[in-house]
Image (tube, rainbow, N blue to C red):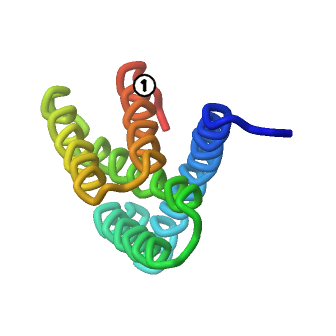
């Protein structure tokens, strides 16, 4: 079966979407394990969520740094990029709960913008930009339709 450039790009985008969705779920399972672990260690029925979020973000940063230092394919790295991007967007949404929507959109827009500028400046392949834009669209859908995660 011979793939054209357009069908190859479409398959790559679909791969990023599917793997990204699976990684979103794994990320939030990891967050739940961290939050529950902190709760068990501190013997406090009220979880220390701020510490858990901080540990979660540090783990994601370390995982991301290690993965991006490897010689894995761009497609794998771009798929993985969805996990820290979506996790950061969700964490910002959680931490800014109750704040005006324009402020939330502004902060998240600034972060997305900085990531996209960085990718552009570093002349990264389109797969990375697609992964970030995919996370942005999913985040907007979650926010606009008030979807609980």
Q: Element at badge 1?
A: helix
Name the residue: 31% across, 68% down. Answer: 54
Residue 78 % position (x, y): 50, 55
Name the residue: 29% across, 63% down. Answer: 50
Q: Residue furthest top?
A: 145
- Above or below, comparing residue 42 to residue 46 in the picture: below
Q: Is residue 109 visible?
A: yes
- Above or below, comparing residue 140 to residue 54 in the picture: above
Q: Can residue 32 be seen in this view?
A: no
Q: Which of 42 and 69 is in front in this view?
A: 69
Name the residue: 40% across, 75% down. Answer: 65
Within the image, what quadrant is residue 137 found in? top left
Q: In which quarter of the image is the N terminus?
A: top right
Within the image, what quadrant is residue 138 found in? top left
- Above or below, comparing residue 133 to residue 25 in the picture: above
Q: Residues within 10 Å of mark 1 (few under 14, many from 20)?
A: few
Left or right, 1 with respect to 62, comes to: right
Within the image, what quadrant is residue 38 found in? bottom left
Q: Which residue lies furthest to the right in this view?
A: 1
Name the residue: 54% across, 64% down. Answer: 30
Q: Which of 98 and 61 is in front in this view?
A: 61
Q: Nearer the viewer, residue 43 or 72?
A: 72
Left or right, 85 with respect to 100, comes to: right
Q: Which of 69 and 63 is in front in this view?
A: 69
Left or right, 8 with respect to 61, comes to: right
Residue 147 % position (x, y): 46, 27
Q: Mark 1 points at which residue?
A: 141
Residue 99 % position (x, y): 16, 34
């Amino acid at each position: 079966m011979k793939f054209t450039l357009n069908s190859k790009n479409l398959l790559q985008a679909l791969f990023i979407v599917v793997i990204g969705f699976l990684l979103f779920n794994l990320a939030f399972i990891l967050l739940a394990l961290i939050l529950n672990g902190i709760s068990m260690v501190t013997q406090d029925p009220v979880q220390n969520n701020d510490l858990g979020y901080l540990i979660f973000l540090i783990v994601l940063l370390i995982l991301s740094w290690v993965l991006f230092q490897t010689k894995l394919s761009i497609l794998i790295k771009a798929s993985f990029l969805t996990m820290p991007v979506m996790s950061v967007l969700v964490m910002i949404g959680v931490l800014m709960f109750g704040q005006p929507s324009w402020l939330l959109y502004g902060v998240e827009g600034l972060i997305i913008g900085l990531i996209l500028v960085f990718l552009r400046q570093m002349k990264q392949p389109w797969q990375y930009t697609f992964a970030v834009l995919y996370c942005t669209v999913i985040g907007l859908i979650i926010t606009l339709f008030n979807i609980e995660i």
